Image: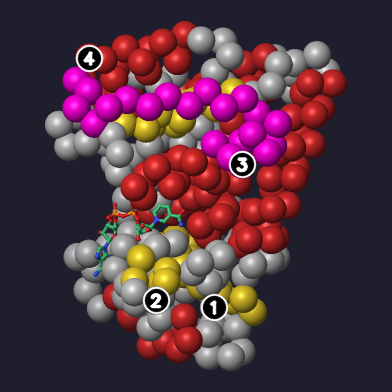
Amino acid sequence: MSARVIDGTAVARRVREDVAKGVEQLLAAGGRPPGLATVLIGDDPASEVYVSNKRRLSVAAGMQDLHRHLPGDVDQETAAALIDELAADPAVSGILLQLPTPKHLDSEALIARIPAAKDVDGLTTANAGLLAQGRPGLRPCTPAGVMVLLEEYDVPLSGAEAVVVGRSVLVGKPMAQLLLAKNATVTMAHSRTKDLAEVCRRADVLVVAAGIPGLVGADAVRPGATVIDVGIHRGENGLHGDVEFDSVAEVAGALTPVPGGVGPMTIAMLLANTLTAAKAQQGIGD
Ligand code: NAD
């Protein structure tokens, strides 16, 4: 293997430590602890694990756990009323609606009720608009985490060719905009892209978020490129990504593993966003 393996677990730990220090500074400046309201609707086991990790790590960083759980058969009005209650509560710095919600609910309408200032997942139209315009706002956690990894590993972005595979609202689109904001030349590839491997081979920085196990192999990677694998798939023998790790590691310059790459960064950035939101709401800056 020739690629440097990007250690997301270590970088995420450092980010969480910085957040914990920031919380201490907020308290020392007379502020209140940031409060994170995770909202889980129903009993999906994977969502329960994600939410319990978010709660545990927010408490470890000195935040208040303001978790709320609604039954899976809750109606839209009741779920909306909970979001409105959290939106109005000054103890709540950030609201995270765990997705996916049960199918009978309109999750977009629920997200739209989250005030932009408490939208720690960066998913509201207001925060997406601020990102598109290059103005400050809360950024979606997974792409924000990828940017921190690229910075930590000194990956040059200005003038670099970046290719993002996937165009979801959660990952692909904000990822492309964050890379653009750092002056990369960004290409977005998606399910209708012709000759994906050829497009990917342009990349100095290749971010793959397609949700298809092993979609990107060594034939799609320019020698020396930095490859970021956002995909997560639970197989019989553990977690895998969208990138064929073993073959790509022979070609790439640097590569994120799954697990231990982008995944841990997502929660770390959620905590960073929650601290940022709390400081802005309390008028206590850096
Ligand atoms: P999504 O299903 O919403 O979007 C997938 C995107 O991939 C679409 O835009 C589609 O056009 C594109 N795509 C599908 N097939 C393709 C193909 N054959 N070639 C090129 N592009 C193709 O998924 P998402 O929410 O963006 O998530 C993507 C992956 O990232 C999933 O595996 C998900 O589990 C994972 N994920 C990981 C984290 C994390 O914390 N590491 C966070 C969010 C999502």
User: Does the beta carbon of the residue at mark 2 sit less than 8 Å from ligand 1?
Assistant: no
Q: Position of residue 174 (x, y in %)?
A: 43, 47
**Mark 1 vs 4: CB contact within 8 A:** no
Residue type at tag 1: Ala
Choose between 117 and 268: the one closer to the eye.
268
- Mark yes or no: residue 178 visible: no
Q: Return the residue at label 1.
A: 225
Residue 237 tag number = 2
Q: Quadrant of residue 151?
A: bottom right
Which numbered disc, 1 or 3, marks the residue that appears first in the sequence?
A: 3
Task: Using the numbered discs, state the Cα–Cα distance from disc 3 to disc 2 in whole angstroms.
Answer: 26 Å
Element class at badge 1: loop
Element class at badge 4: helix
Which numbered disc, 1 or 4, marks the residue that appears first in the sequence?
A: 4
Q: Position of residue 212 (x, y in %)?
A: 29, 68
State which image quarter holds ligand 1.
bottom left
Q: Return the residue at label 3.
A: 57
- Mark yes or no: residue 160 visible: yes
